[in-house]
Structure formats: C-alpha cells, structure tokens
Amino acid sequence: MERIVFCNGRFVPEDQARVSVFDRGFLFGDAVYEVVAVLGGAMIDNDLHMARLERSLEALNIQMPMPRAQIEAVQAELIARNAMTEGTVYLQVSRGEADRDFLYSPDLTPTLIAFTQARKLAATKGQTEGVAVDLAPDPRWARRDIKTTMLLGQVMAKAEARARHFDDVWLVGDDGFVTEGASSTAFIVTPEGRIRTRANSQAILPGCTRRALLRLCEEKSVSIEERPFTPEEAKAAAEAFLTSSSAFVTPVIRIGDAKIGDGRPGPLTRRLQTLYLDTAFGRSHYAAAF
C-alpha cells in the first residue's frame, strides 16, 4: 500500500508530496518537529508533544499552522489511512516560503508536513538486552530546548558513535557534565539507588517521555534527583538508561569503555520500563516482554 502523507493542507501519496525550494525549513533549518509513538494504533503522550510543539514555535515566533485539535485530527487520519498499528507520526512545521533572506516577514504562512513510519518500537533488542553508548563533546547551539530541525551536530555524533561500534551517544557539555543523548534523555542510577537526570534548561530538550516518566515516578513514590552528572559518575553507576519517544525506556549496559553494573539491564530500569508501558499502553504483551 502506498504511503499517504500530509503536505500543504492535503493528504497525498508520498510521491506527490512537494515542498518549495524557497521554504525556510530547507534554506535555514527554520523549522521545528515532533515525533509521536504509536502502539496498537494509539498515540502515546501526544498531549505532551503538542504542548512542546506550541512552545518551540512560540520560542521561534512561528505561528501554529492550525489549531491543535486539527493537527491531532491530521495525525489520527494518517494513522488510519496508512493502517499503522505500531510506529511513529512525524510532524514538521517551518516558518514558510519566501525568497532567501535572513530577515523574515512576520506574516509568512507556516508549512506543515506530516507522515507515518511503521516500525517496531516496543520490546526491541535494545530494550530487552540494553545498549552501549559512546561519549562525545556536545557540538550544538545554545538553545537546545527548542526542538528545531537543525540536527547536523546530532547526525555527526551518532555517525561517529556507530563507526566506533556503539549503539548511541551521550553528549558532554563544556561544563564537563553530560547534557543528554543525541536523540534521548540520559539517566543514571547511583550505587546508592538514586535516579539522576539533568534538570530542564536551555542546555537540553525537555523530553516528553522524560516528563511522562517523572510524573509516573512521582505517582509511584520513585524518587528522581534532577541534577547534572559527569561521565565519570555515569561510568560508576549501578544502572543507566535513556528515554525517548521511540525508544521509551531503554537500558544502557555500557558507557564508553565502562560496563554498567553486571553488563545487563538492572532491576530498577526493568521496573520503569514496565511501569511506563503499562501506563501508556495498558497491560499487554509489550510490557510482559520485559
């Protein structure tokens, strides 16, 4: 079945979707995006993604392309038209189309594109067995809290990590502390059993899965300490894991050259995996897989 995408206000076959070469998203990376997970045909944490989309657009002074309810209707329609039960829905909003100029007109009409990607998200090999993450200097701009499409730093870091036979990479800021993963939030569990992750600021993206997990931990009286940690603290952790919209809660079993714990996903990470999927999707074979 040919994939249907949303482009320029219409649902069209993917080979008919076109965006102008004068779109500022193409010329300047003047655009933001969101990726929403779908399990069992239902979107996960979409309210958090829509709130972050609005926040990112406001930070860049880009108008919402349509009311939130209409965007959610587009997402649902794409899932239905593509008969997708598991995968992601990608949204991208650019400032719009205009002749190339660093200064932009305030009355540009934003460009909205959206499409689905069917793929396995839950009970993946990484989630069941854990992943190894590299450590690399953070090359990105200062406003990492805005989910822009300017991802070249992350692309370069992930490519280098893959070349070094790592599954992913955590980035280290000029202050010597881990900021976040190239496309995820970084967590460690100290030898004393405390979960740590960096507090939200302009240095990191406010992850939607991070926020959902912190909310669940508060409900279940699982304590999480929001403060930075160094690569050395990460390597000495009892457990480590990462969160993202498409990886959910994924154990980290090696950081750089250091094995974490006994080199297998730890018990607290397993508990958080099950807690998140039980809440997001309901009790199912997904949660049971852990």
Image (tube, rainbow, N blue to C red):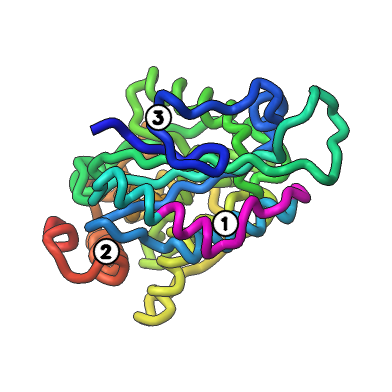
Number of numbered callouts drawn:
3
In the picture of the structure, the residue carrying the numbered disc 1 is: 206
**Residue at image mark 2:** 277
Let me know if residue 131 is in the magenta part.
no
Magenta span of residues = 60-75
Q: Amino acid at mark 1?
A: Pro
Mark nearer the viewer, 3 or 1: 3
Q: Sequence order check: which comes first, mark 2 or mark 1? A: 1
- Res 277 → quadrant: bottom left
User: Which residue is at 58% across, 43% downward?
Assistant: 112
Q: CA distance from mark 3 to mark 1?
A: 31 Å
Quadrant holding the N terminus: top left
Residue drawn at x 77%, y 29% is: 98
Q: Amino acid at mark 2?
A: Leu
- Ranked by sequence position, the earlier of labels 3 and 1 is 3
* Distance in Å between CA atoms under marks 3 and 2: 31 Å
Crowd band around label 3 with a 10 angstrom C-alpha radius: few (<14), some (14–19), many (20+): some
Residue at the image point whose x is 70% and y is 37% from the top: 96
Quadrant housing residue 126: top left
**Residue at x-position 42% and y-position 63%:** 45
Q: Secondary structure at mark 3?
A: helix
What x and y, as percent, mark residue 139? 64, 30
Residue placed most toward the observer, 273 or 189: 273
Circles 2 and 1: CB atoms closer than 8 Å: no
The answer to whether any part of residue 268 appears in the image is no
> Is residue 185 placed above or below 94 in the rendered structure?
below
Find residue 222 and report its horizontal and vertical position in percent.
38, 76
Which amino acid, by three-letter code, is at mark 3? Glu
Answer above or below: position of 135 versus 40: above
Query: Quick one: SS at disc 1?
Result: loop
Image quadrant holding the C terminus, namely bottom left
Q: Mark 3 sits on what residue?
A: 14
